[in-house]
Amino acid sequence: MIVDPVPSLSRIASEVWKPLLGLFIWDCAVTLAYFVLPFRAPSLPLTIFGTVLALFLGFRSNSAYARWWEARTLWGAMINASRSLSRATRNFLPDPDAVELKREIVRRQIAYVNALRCQLRRQPIGEDVTKFLNEEDKGKALARTNPANGLLDSTGRRIAIARAKGWIDSIQQTQMEAVLVDIANAQGGMERIKNTPLPVQYRYLPTIFTHIFCIALPIGLVESLGLATPLGSTVAGLMFLAVLRIGDDLVDPFANTVHDNPLSAMCRTIEIDLLQSIGDPAPDPVTPVRGVLW
C-alpha cells in the first residue's frame, strides 16, 4: 500500500508511459492525416460516448474499491480477534502447569496469520510460519490443502485439551471458541474476495470500451482542436485510462503489489502484540520501503 502523501513521479511514469506514448502516436497520426489527406472524418457524438463510459468506469472503480476496503476491514477484525484470543489465553490459563500450552496457543496464532497471508498472496509458506510451531506440528497442519485452516483447527484442539485437563471451564472454552469462529469468518471473507473475481462484464467490457473511445477521440476532436489535437486528445484519453487502471489496481487487494493491503505490516502488528502478551521479545514494526508499506 502506497503511504506517501504524494505518489512517486517515477512510479507513476513507469505505469503510464506506455499507454501515454501509444495515445500520443495515434493522435499525431490522425492529426497528420487530417491535414494531408483530402477527406474529412465524420463528426462523432463524443460527449454521449464519454458520459456513458465515465459512468461505467465509475461503477467499476467503486466496486473494486469496495473489495479493497472490505479486505482491510476483515484484516482489522483479524487483528482484534488475535488480540482477544491472546488475552483470553493468558487470563484463563493462570495454572503453572498450563504455561507451555498457553505459549503454544499464542504462538500458533502468529503462525496462523502469517500462513493466511502467504495463502492469499499465493506465496510458499516459509520460516516466518514454521518458527512459531513445534517440530512435531510442522508436518501436520501445514500438510493440509488449507494450511491456515489446519492451524486454526489445531488451536481449537488445544483449547479442548485445556478443558479436558480442568485448566478452563466450559464457559471459558465457549468464549475462546467464539473468538475462533470470528477468526474463521474473517478468513472465509478474505478467501471469498481472493477467489471470486469481478463479473466478466466489469472486467472486460470497460477495457474494450475505453480503448475504442481513445481511438475515436482524436477523430472527433481534430476538426475543432487542429494542431493541438495530440495534446488535448492524449490528456483526455489518459484520464479514462487512469480510471480504468485504478480499478485494475484495487480489484485484488491480496495481489502482493504496491496497491494491495499491507498484509506483512498487519501480520507483524499481530506478532508484536501477541509476543509481548506472553513476555517474549518482539520484533520492530514493518516500516515503509520507498513509500510503500507491504
Image (cartoon, helix red, strand yellow):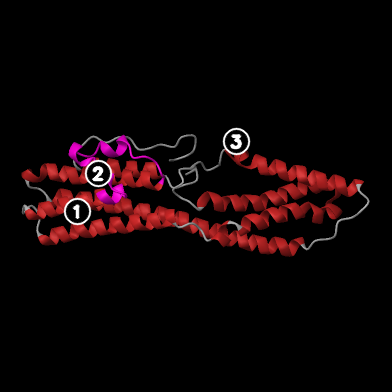
Asked if the residue at tag 1 contacts the one at tag 3, i.e. Cβ–Cβ closer than 8 Å, the answer is: no
- For mark 1, does the 10 Å Cα neighbourhood hold few (<14), some (14 to 19), or many (20 or more) residues? some
Amino acid type shown at disc 1: Gly
Amino acid type shown at disc 2: Leu
Q: Image check: 57 left or right of 31?
A: left
Tell me where residue 258 appears, x and y as whole percent: 49, 42
Q: Image check: 100 left or right of 192?
A: left
Could you say whether the residue bearing mark 3 is in a helix, strand or loop?
helix
Question: Which of the two residues, 246 or 190, is positioned nearer the viewer here?
Answer: 190
Tell me where residue 55 appears, x and y as whole percent: 63, 63
Q: Is residue 18 above or below residue 66?
A: above
Q: Is residue 139 magenta?
A: yes
Q: Earlier in the sequence, mark 3 or mark 1?
A: 3
Residue at mark 1: 156
**Furthest-right residue in view?**
38
Q: CA distance from mark 3 to mark 2?
A: 38 Å
Q: Earlier in the sequence, mark 3 or mark 2?
A: 3
Tell me where residue 294 appears, x and y as whole percent: 43, 40
Residue at mark 2: 274
Residue shown at 19% from the left, 53% from the top: 156
Residue at mark 3: 10
Residue shown at 31% from the left, 49% from the top: 145
Amino acid type shown at disc 3: Ser
Question: Which of the two residues, 148 or 4, is positioned nearer the viewer here?
Answer: 148
Q: Is residue 279 magenta?
A: no
Residue 103 found in image quarter = top left
Which residues fall within the magenta stretch?
121-150
Tell me where residue 76 appears, x and y as whole percent: 36, 53
Q: CA distance from mark 3 to mark 1?
A: 48 Å
